[in-house]
Amino acid sequence: MNAKRLLPVLLLLTAVPAVWAAVDPFYQGLLRDGQYAYDRKDFAAAARDLRLACFGMLDEPRQLAGCLARLALAQDASGDVDGFRETFRRLVEVEDRFKGYSQGELPADLRSSLETRLAARIPAATLAAAPAFRSTQQAAAKPPQKPAVSPTPGKPEPVKQEPAKPAPAPVAAAPAVPKGLNDADRQKLEQARQLLGDQRTAKELRQAFDLARGVADAHPESKEAQLLAAEGAYRISRWKEASTYFQRGGDPGEDQPERLFYMAVALYESGDRAGAAALLKRSLPNLKRTSYVDGYAKKILGQ
C-alpha cells in the first residue's frame, strides 16, 4: 500500500482513542458513522447514530462521556434543544458518578466546541452547580457594563447605589416564613435554600426542588415556598414547573433581579413570550451580562 492510500487509513485509526477498543465493534461503527454524518452536516442522522452508539457504552463511562459530547453537538446543530439539554443532564450524571467527563480522553477541540454551546444553551446557575463545567460558565462571562448582581444563586455581585433605586438584597437572604408553616416545614425550606447555593451538584439541586415543592404544594399561601420551588425547578431546567410555581408565588419584586430573570426564562420556555419580556426588562439593569443572559435577551427582546 503506497503512502497516499495509507494516510486516510491512519487518520481513521487515530480518530478514535485506543480505549474505545473495550466497546463492541458494532457501537464503534455507529460512533464513526455518526462522526461522518456530522462532518457532512447531516446532523439528524449524526444524532441518531450517536444516540445508539452511546447506548453501547453504558459500561464504559469515559468513552460514554465522549460519545455524549458528540451527541450533544449533533443535537445542537440540528436544533434539538430539548435533546441537547437531556444529553447534558446525562453527561452530568456520568461525571457525578464516574468522573467520566473530567477524566475522559476527549479531544481538546471537542471539549471546546461542547463547552461553547453549553454556555449558550444551559443556565449559568446549572453550569455553576456542576464542577466539571464551572469553567464553561466563567469563560462565557463578559465584563459587566455596570456594577450588577450575578444570575448565579448564592453569589450576588455588588450593586451601585443610585438615588432613584435602592440596592437589591441578596437572593439567599432568608425571608420571614408564614405562620402556617410548622418547624418541619421551615427546616425543609432552609435545607432547600442551602442546597440551592453555589457549587451544587445536579443531585443536590433535584433534592432542593423536591424539598421546596413538598412544602409549596402543602402550603399554597407561602410565597417563599413557591419561589424556592420555582427556583429549584429553574435550576434543573424544568421550565413548566418553574413557571407554575413562580405564578403561584407571585412577582418576586425588584429587590430580587435574579428571580425575575429566572421567572422570565421559565415563562419564555413555557411559551409566554410577552410575560417573559416584561420581567426580563425589569431584571436586566441589575444583572451581570453573560453570554447566557445576552442569549435570552436576544431571543426574548430581540436585542
Image: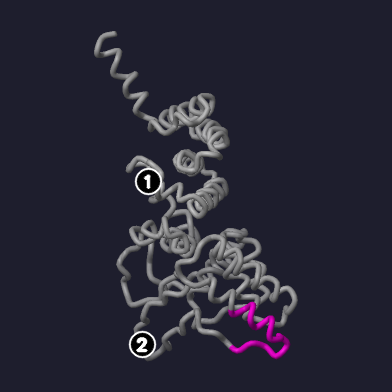
Q: In which quarter of the image is residue 143?
A: bottom left
Q: Is residue 286 in view from this perspective?
A: no
181 in magenta: yes
Relative side of 102 to 236, left or right: left
3 vs 29: above or below? above
Q: Which residue is drawn at 53% across and 27% down?
A: 24
Quadrant in the rendering for residue 269: bottom right
Could you tell me residue 65's position as x and y percent?
Answer: 47, 43
Instruction: Tell me if I can see residue 263 in this picture.
Output: yes
For the residue labelled by badge 1, is the local secondary structure a helix, a strand or a loop? helix
Residue 73 drawn above or below residue 238 = above
Tell me the residue at 70%/76% (across/down): 215
Amino acid bearing label 2: Gln
Instruction: Give SS at disc 2.
Output: loop
Q: Name the residue under label 1.
A: 111
Nearer to us in this view, 277 or 123 = 123
Magenta residues span: 176-190
Q: Mark 2 points at which residue?
A: 161
State which tag comes first along the sequence, 1 or 2.
Answer: 1
Question: How far from the left and from the top, in percent, is residue 88?
Answer: 51, 50
